[in-house]
Image (cartoon, grey):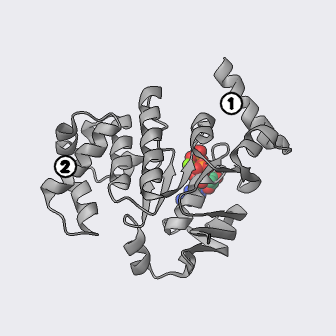
Amino acid sequence: MDSLLRVEHVTISYNGKPVVQDVSFELKQGEILGIVGESGSGKSTVIKAIMGLLGEEGLVTEGDIWYKGENLTSMSEKKLRGYLGKEIGMVFQDCKAALCPVRTIGAQIHEAVSEHEKISRQETWKRAGEIMKKIGLDDSERVLNSYPFELSGGMNQRVGICTAMIMHPNLLLADEPTSALDVTVQKQVVEELLLMRKEYHTAMILVTHNIGVVKMMADRILVLQNGVVRDYGETDAVLNHSEDPYTKKLMSSVLHLKRD
Ligand SMILES: Nc1ncnc2c1ncn2[C@@H]1O[C@H](COP(=O)(O)OP(=O)(O)OP(=O)(O)O)[C@@H](O)[C@H]1O
Ligand SMILES: [Mg+2]
């Protein structure tokens, strides 16, 4: 099967200074890739580069990012915008910051959905409510009527997950989607994401510090350190049989934390 997404020898710089170097990986439809690595290793930068959301300072200086055979790095902004939200969904690391502070959650979700399809407000709310219930936001009416500042961090995070899921994207880029959630809710979110993959054959890139979540979800793992790929392979191989000293240390430090 052909790749859905192929990242080839990509180097990314902010203000001319490279922070991610020579990163390559690929993702087929329905596959989940976990990206792990210490804080500042470039995980979010890789995700943002795919979406063309590096901002003024950021640039892919070398390499290509292929999505369904089209090069995202040279795609017009208009065409890329058409993909974002619909074909390619994103859960931001800081979901609250990604939401507009002065508009209700319901209005924002409805706007996101109606950008890509003709849909009534009631239908959006119904669909959003169904997803919210599955990820532990039981009082979806209140959530939809709230402003982001009226919700907790974990609630905003689930709003971000709901907004991304409601479109049934082909590819979901999720940056720390469960970091602000307690264990029970984390489990619900993981189960819902896996169900979405099963039903819609969604491909996902999952950035997380939580090795347990990666273990449960990912088919393959990419390990980044200081913007350089330390390891890339099948989940079990990277988790349990890596030869790379950094990967081994990263995995064992997590195990120690768990034991403590
Ligand atoms: N807009 C920006 N301008 C300049 N430098 C940036 C910008 N965004 C990120 N960086 C730098 O790029 C490097 C990688 O950052 P990135 O956010 O990708 O790390 P990360 O792996 O996602 O970290 P974390 O686990 O803390 O989220 C860091 O050194 C960071 O300071
Ligand atoms: Mg990050």
Count residues near mark 2 (Cα–Cα under 10 Å), then give few for <14, some for 14-19, many for 20+.
some
Tag nearer the camera, 2 or 1: 2
Count residues near mark 1 (Cα–Cα under 10 Å), then give few for <14, some for 14-19, many for 20+.
some
Residue positioned 26% across, 68% down in the render: 115
Quadrant in which residue 214 is drawn: top right
- 144 or 68, which lies in front? 68
- 246 or 199, which lies in front? 199
Left or right of 44? Residue 241 is right
Task: Report whether residue 102 is seen.
Answer: no
Q: Position of residue 174 (x, y in %)?
A: 49, 51
Residue type for callout 2? Lys
Which element is circle 1 on? helix
Q: Position of residue 24 (x, y in %)?
A: 70, 65
Residue positioned 23% across, 62% down in the render: 111
Which mark, by number, is residue 68?
none
Task: Report whether residue 87 is seen.
Answer: yes
Q: What quarter of the picture does the C terminus occupy?
A: top right
Residue positioned 34% across, 59% down in the render: 167
Residue type for callout 1? Val
Left or right of 20? Residue 76 is left
Left or right of 65? Residue 156 is left
Q: Position of residue 190 (x, y in %)?
A: 47, 40
Residue positioned 37% across, 64% down in the render: 85
Q: Position of residue 1 (x, y in %)?
A: 62, 69
Mark 2 vs mark 1: which is more N-terminal? 2
- Can you identify the residue that label 1 sits on? 254
Which element is circle 2 on? helix
- Can you identify the residue that label 2 sits on? 126
Above or below, 257 against 29 in this view is: above
